[in-house]
């Protein structure tokens, strides 16, 4: 259950980032449209808000990328089953390989007994 809440939390964080990107684009459009009449205080506030938003989005996306990198590389972290699944898959492949080799040995023994 904790895995689902962690995943939902990550999705909410990405949705927040998406909303902030929308706000950044809106600020950029306002800055572009306000070029006819220059109100320096307004432009300074909008530019500061734009810069702060871009920095926040960059930091949040970097955090998300770091998290996804940990998950993809199998490093242990809360809520990940990737490493365990990979270990299980590799164990199953080793079992299949062992079965194949044992059947080959069994066939070889049968042929030796027949001769």
Image (cartoon, rainbow, N blue to C red):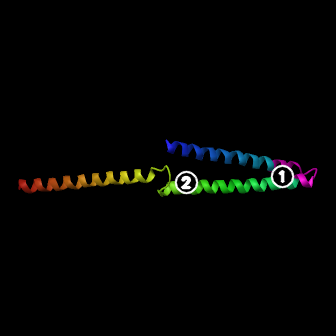
Q: Magenta part mainly helix, strand or loop?
A: helix
Image location (x, y in percent) of residue 111: 10, 54
What segment carries the magenta color? 28-42
Q: Name the foreground residue: 67 vs 35.
A: 67
User: Is 29 displayed left or right of 80 in the figure?
Assistant: right
Residue holding disc 1: 46
Residue holding disc 2: 68
Q: What is the distance, in whole Å, between disc 2 and disc 1 at their CAs?
A: 32 Å
User: Closer to the N terminus: mark 2 or mark 1?
Assistant: 1
Image location (x, y in percent) of residue 43: 87, 53
Q: Residue at x 41, y 52 (%)?
A: 84
Q: Residue at x 85, y 51 (%)?
A: 32
Examine the structure image and report whether residue 108 is included in the region drawn in magenta: no
Image location (x, y in percent) of residue 82: 45, 51
User: What secondary structure is marked by label 2?
Assistant: helix
Crowd band around label 1 with a 10 angstrom C-alpha radius: few (<14), some (14–19), many (20+): some
Crowd band around label 2 with a 10 angstrom C-alpha radius: few (<14), some (14–19), many (20+): few
User: What secondary structure is marked by label 1?
Assistant: helix
Q: Which mark is residue 7?
A: none
Of the 4 image quadrants, the one containing the C terminus is: bottom left
Q: How many marks?
A: 2
Examine the structure image and report whether residue 38 is included in the region drawn in magenta: yes
Q: Residue at x 80, y 49 (%)?
A: 27
User: Is 60 displayed left or right of 35 in the figure?
Assistant: left
Image location (x, y in percent) of residue 37: 94, 50
């Amino acid at each position: 259950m904790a895995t689902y809440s962690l995943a939902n939390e990550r999705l909410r964080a990405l949705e927040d980032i998406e909303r902030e990107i929308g706000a950044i684009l809106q600020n950029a459009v306002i800055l572009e449209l306000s070029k006819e009449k220059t109100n320096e205080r307004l432009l300074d506030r909008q530019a500061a808000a734009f810069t702060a938003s871009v920095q926040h989005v960059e930091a949040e996306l970097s955090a998300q990328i770091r998290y996804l990198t940990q998950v993809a590389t199998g490093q242990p972290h809360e809520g990940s089953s990737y490493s365990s699944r990979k270990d299980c898959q590799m164990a199953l492949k080793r079992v299949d390989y062992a079965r194949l080799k044992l059947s080959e040995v069994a066939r070889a023994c049968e042929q030796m007994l027949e001769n």
